[in-house]
Image (cartoon, rainbow, N blue to C red):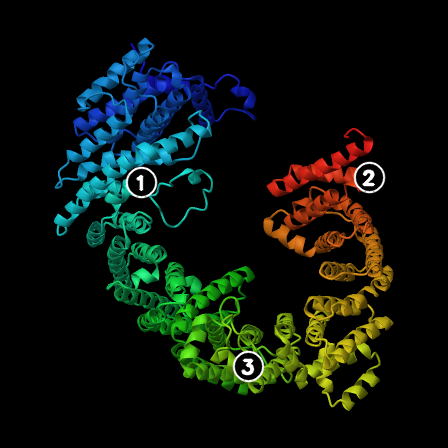
Amino acid sequence: MTTSAVDELKHLLTIPPQGYEHRCYGSGMNPQAVAHAALEHLRESGDTNFLFLRSVLELTSSLMSAAESQSPNPWDANTEEFLFHCITGCRFVILTRWESFSRTFKNTVKDWFMLCGDRYRTSKAIRMVLYTSSVAIWKRGWNQHSGGAVADPSSPKEHHLLEVMARQLSAAGMPSVLESPAELFQYLQNRINNNTSNNTSNFEEPSSYLSVLVGEFSGKSASDYNMPLEFHKRMYATFEKDSLEECLKIAMQALSLVVANSTKESNNRTSREKEAAAVSVVDATIEILSWEFGASAWLHLSSRSTLIRPPPEWAPYIVRPDFVGAIVMFHQNACSQQACHLAKQIRQLLLLLCSVSGIFQDKAQRKLYAQFFCEGSQQLVSLSAASLQQQHDDASAISALVFDSFSLVSRLLTNFRLDTLSDLPSFPLLLDALRDSGMALSRANHQESLQVQGDVNSMEHGEWREEALALMLEVIVLLCQDPWLRDQKKEVETKSAIRMQLNQRLGPLYDDFIACRREMVRIEEAFLVKEGEVPDEDEEEIKDAKMKEEMEALASLGRMCISKSLSTLGVYFQRAATDVLSSWACGTTGDITPEVAGLLKDVDLVVRHVGHLLTDENDRLPLFVEMECEADHVAVENIACAIRSLLTLMQEHGSRVPSSQSKKGLSSRLAQTFLWLLRRWVPSYVYSSTGGRGTISKIRLFWSVPEAANQVLDFCCWICLQYLQWHEDIAVLQSAANLLTILGKQNKPSRFAMKQSVHFQQLYFFHCISAGIADKAEATSKLQNLSLSINSYQSYELLPEDTRARVLTALMISFGDCDSGSESLFNDCMRAVQEQFKTKSSMVSSVALFYGLVQAIPYVQGEERITSFVVAFFCPLSELMKHYISDLDLCKQVLVLFCSYAETARQVKLTDDQMTSLLRATSELLKLYSTHHCAARSIEVSKSAKEIREEEENAYDDILCALKLLKNLLGLSRGGVSNVADVVFFGIQQLIPLMTQGLLSYPTLCNEYFSVVSILVKRFPEKIPSLPNDLSQGLLQSLQMGVNHHDADIAKRSLSSLEELHRANHVQSGSVQ
């Protein structure tokens, strides 16, 4: 009695292959592991008894018999899994031992696999593995067909299997074995042609096979073929050149029949078979259109263009505008019959067709093609709006429709641009549909937020709606920031009319969106305060970034009519400001209530909307704002009115800071928002430049009048002075000091206005007195003589050292012009730092002030005034560190000071004496630092990436700073200053003991270290042979670690440094001439 192949193979899978026992640990063997090992062994050994193929024959025969007798599927899941492995095993053996089998056998197997796939309908996975196996054999022998005689089978076993498969193929109506690609395509074409337009259910098999065929040739994997990557590249190019167009022809013919059949039967329910066939046809078309053309497909796999550029020969099949309309109707029919998967695939097909570019005959054909897609997009977006308004239960179907609709519009705008689309009659309707969809989305989100009372984590549909809104806003940006629309050199009137149309059609979306978002933010903040929840910092950062992107996108729409947008925001601002002022009138002490928290968040949101509206992402005056102000002076007045309202609220807010013991009711976030607005708006408008057009515009001129400009700058100095008393929040202090610095950097008129401000003068006096007068009684007397507030001065004295350093930077920049009015103020500020350093009790705190001086160097005239002043204190600072070297924080400050000075000095030519002082002080500092903080330091590596990042920032930032100092010193080595190399080599020698595998796991530290070493050995190779042995060995060991680093740049840099190291040593020894 003959044993079946299935039983024989199953028995074989229970026997461990030879040598398997040596790889097992513990007692016993896992049956699944044994089966896997036996299966792999059979595949690798070549399956000489054809167990894989015979098992497939037996199993498929039993299935076909059951199908003919209309019996149920006789298999269970385990049998299907067994069949799957048999098919893949057979494929592997044929592909990896290609020359061992006759051409007849391989051709018959691939055709028989295709036949089995056609007949196997119960499992998609089995069908696909049969198709992919057939296609893989096709690909391996794609160019090996010929018209000559087919080689005979090489063995009786092969001959028997051929007879069995040939009988089944003949019974299925297969005329003969398909030997060439032409025969394959003709066979698939005939299967499509044999189906009438009224019966497309049989399209599923040939379309699925065609899709798998294209997918296999487009794949870039070299697995399971036992062939080099060049083979796949060659097959890719061959298929693209000779066969891809034929695939497109077959797919488009099948698609035409499916679309036509759908149109005829639009009122009838589509059967499941026809729907599956339609999906297969659409999938095949998508697979073909997704092909990446040219050799570049193998070069940059992750940077594929949004648009596709097929060869010109494809134009007759693709560029059929009327057919686009039919596909849109096809989609509507699928939606009406709730064929969700088919509808989604049709939308993906439309997205690809909309991405076609570069194959149109002329502009007229391109415009006609765009017209049909504009109409189709409008219908899809309108359908999305209707679905959102009806609030269907099937959220997944609605979300997919909304996402795909917005994606289609985005692709339409990317491909055809506004200059083409704005001429189309359907364009206004598309804008209306976008408005309706956006409003429906934002209102639905708002309504659900109200239902959950601000608990956004309980919103069922909030996440996908937010993603859809973000996609819709991307469309808004494409519309309102179109490069053609921004080009004002020609067609100015036409573009002005389009901007008006965008405002009229989409303007209501701007108002509605902000109204809904305001209410959502308010109740969400109230909920968080009520529940006492503290938001996660990372989540808040992500949320703020998304909110910023949202505001920038909305601002691009709002700038289509700045007056109307400001009017909308003005109404919201007045309401919120009135409520906030009422709450402040009741007192700002004690815990903040949920209602007040919501109001403060509301005001914060509106202020940020105004900031984004009036300035762009580069903190500049937006083009369309300037244009509207130039055309209509009312816009200038509206901006001025809005700014005055904001400054009034800022004044109310700032005036309460000094008198409020508890500032919770004032909101430090709101203070930061006010400072953010001033930081963006003032440089863009006040004493701003001409914007590159030669003449100053009306809006710039309005804020360049000294009376108005100086008033604004004086207010900025006042508000900063007030917020510098907000000691509870370091972010507010830093923002206030940074605003002063930014204003000082702007231009000479701004600096002159700041010097005239009594509030800025107060900061000057506060600095000079606090730094230059140690005796409190003398300081008090000085304040009284100058009529300055003692309370304000005492508050200034309490500022953190780094904040006072930032204020000093602003003072030095503002007094940095070389004129008679600034020189004495400039020198007074430095003299105060000198006096503080002389005072023993305040010498340490002067380090931060020296840093503040250094930060001002690039922005002052006659920068040598600061460089020569600061460098004179470096040696005394090094001496000072002898007494405080155990204080690592202070050591970090001095390292940062030296590092910053060295970086700045690269732009300023130091004298030889100054360079000598810098190097001597640096050498002494590094010696003290290494003795107390490097020698006995242990390095511990964190487990997670987050812990690595935090530990790198906190525990090892002093090492990073020391490395940056050495790197900056190398930048000073021009001009033959050899002492620089000695100092840097000395510094590296101190740090090398720390450069273990553990420390080099920190990315920034690792990059910085190997960067310094690479520059050092390449610039000073003559120094290498004379290095101390421990330094030379340390460099060698660390570079060897770098060569094995996972980062390719570090490994390359380390290898190059090793080469320089060895070359220098060989040159010294005379082995290289």
Using the image, determine if residue 435 lies above or below residue 355: below
Label placed on residue 288: 1
In the depicted view, which residue is nearer to us: 444 or 976?
A: 976
Q: Earlier in the sequence, mark 2 or mark 3?
A: 3
Q: Quadrant of the C terminus?
A: top right
The image position of residue 366, as x and y in percent, is 28, 53
Q: Residues within 10 Å of mark 2 (few under 14, many from 20)?
A: few
Residue ID for mark 3: 704
In 3D space, how far apart are the residues under numbered discs 2 and 3 (Cα atoms)? Answer: 64 Å
Give the quarter of the image for residue 764: bottom right
Using the image, determine if residue 890 lies above or below residue 607: above
Identify the residue at image location x=64%, y=85%: 659
The image position of residue 230, as x and y in percent, is 45, 29
Q: Quadrant of the N terminus?
A: top left
Q: Amino acid at mark 1?
A: Ile
Q: Are marks 2 and 3 in contact (CB under 8 Å)?
A: no
Q: Earlier in the sequence, mark 1 or mark 2?
A: 1
Give the quarter of the image for residue 297: top left
Q: Identify the secondary structure beneath mark 1.
A: helix
In 3D space, how far apart are the residues under numbered discs 1 and 2 (Cα atoms)? Answer: 63 Å
The image position of residue 753, as x and y in percent, is 64, 82
In the depicted view, which residue is nearer to us: 927 or 30?
A: 927
Label placed on residue 1030: 2
Q: Residues within 10 Å of mark 1 (few under 14, many from 20)?
A: many
Q: Is residue 963 left or right of residue 200?
A: right
In 3D space, how far apart are the residues under numbered discs 3 and 1 (Cα atoms)? Answer: 60 Å
In the depicted view, which residue is nearer to us: 578 or 724?
A: 724
Q: Nearer the viewer, mark 3 or mark 1?
A: 3
Using the image, determine if residue 1061 lies above or below residue 1008: above
Q: Nearer the viewer, mark 1 or mark 2?
A: 1
Q: Nearer the viewer, mark 2 or mark 3?
A: 3
